[in-house]
């Protein structure tokens, strides 16, 4: 039977003098068990449902990699990163804080999150219309200008009257 001793290392236990008269002990694992298998780099469970691939770190702290929005431990699909919501009427799709892939609606010009919505002003490029707005079908339409309601402008001598 070996003679007990204290090797002065708090990270070991069951210290004894060996055959060469050197005092040495067995490593105490991360669970506090002398010679146990729970050492840094081995699998553990940090009891968090939001992590995976849990291992003991150098200081015996059990920690895992964050499970991303696609369910992959340590994956790149995190809130705020791009995704595809599968909806062709949206763009700039990104994962939200709840890991839902959500896109911004495309406006009448096809701009994600733009401001050209039905009922908002636009310019149909026609001088014979006014008060142009986007229709519910995203067509820019205006009201015809009533030329008969325009004020009469006196004409120069020898020219016909003109309406504005």
Image (tube, helix red, strand yellow):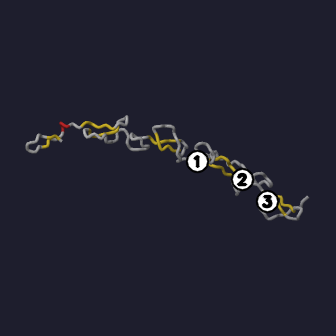
For the residues marked 3 and 2, what is the alpha-carbon distance in whole angstroms?
A: 18 Å
- Sort mark 1 into few (<14), some (14-19) or many (20+) by Cα contacts within 10 Å: some
Nearer the N terminus, badge 1 or badge 3?
Answer: 3
The image quadrant that residue 132 belongs to is top left
**SS at mark 3 in the image:** strand
Q: Nearer the viewer, mark 3 or mark 2?
A: 2
Q: Position of residue 39 (x, y in %)?
A: 75, 54
**SS at mark 2 in the image:** loop
Front position in the image: 14 or 21: 21
Q: Which residue is mark 3?
A: 12
Q: Position of residue 57 (x, y in %)?
A: 69, 55
The reply, left or right, for residue 67 in relation to residue 105 is right
Q: Nearer the viewer, mark 1 or mark 3?
A: 1
Instruction: Name, please, the residue furthest toward the right.
Output: 1
- Sort mark 2 into few (<14), some (14-19) or many (20+) by Cα contacts within 10 Å: few
Q: Which residue is mark 2?
A: 41
- Sort mark 3 into few (<14), some (14-19) or many (20+) by Cα contacts within 10 Å: some
Q: Which residue is mark 1?
A: 76
Q: Position of residue 102 (x, y in %)?
A: 50, 41
For the residues marked 2 and 1, what is the alpha-carbon distance in whole angstroms?
A: 23 Å
Q: Position of residue 157 (x, y in %)?
A: 8, 44
The image quadrant that residue 16 belongs to is bottom right
The residue located at (82%, 64%) in the rendering is 7
Above or below, comparing residue 24 to residue 97 in the picture: below
Nearer the N terminus, badge 3 or badge 2?
Answer: 3
Nearer the N terminus, badge 2 or badge 1?
Answer: 2
């Amino acid at each position: 039977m070996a003679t007990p001793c204290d090797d002065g290392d708090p990270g070991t236990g069951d210290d004894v003098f060996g055959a060469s008269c050197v005092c040495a002990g067995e490593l105490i694992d991360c669970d506090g068990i002398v010679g146990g298998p729970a050492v840094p780099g081995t699998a553990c469970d940090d009891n968090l449902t939001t992590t995976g691939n849990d291992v003991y770190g150098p200081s015996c702290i059990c920690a895992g990699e964050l499970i991303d929005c696609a369910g992959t431990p340590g994956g790149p699909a995190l809130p705020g990163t791009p995704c595809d919501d599968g909806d062709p009427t949206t763009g700039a799709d990104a994962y939200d804080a709840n890991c839902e892939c959500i896109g911004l609606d495309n406006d009448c010009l096809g701009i994600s999150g733009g401001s050209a919505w039905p009922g908002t002003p636009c310019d149909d490029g026609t001088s014979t219309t006014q008060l142009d707005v986007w229709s519910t079908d995203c067509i820019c339409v205006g009201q015809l200008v009533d030329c008969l309601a325009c004020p009469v402008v006196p004409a120069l001598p020898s020219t016909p009257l003109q309406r504005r």
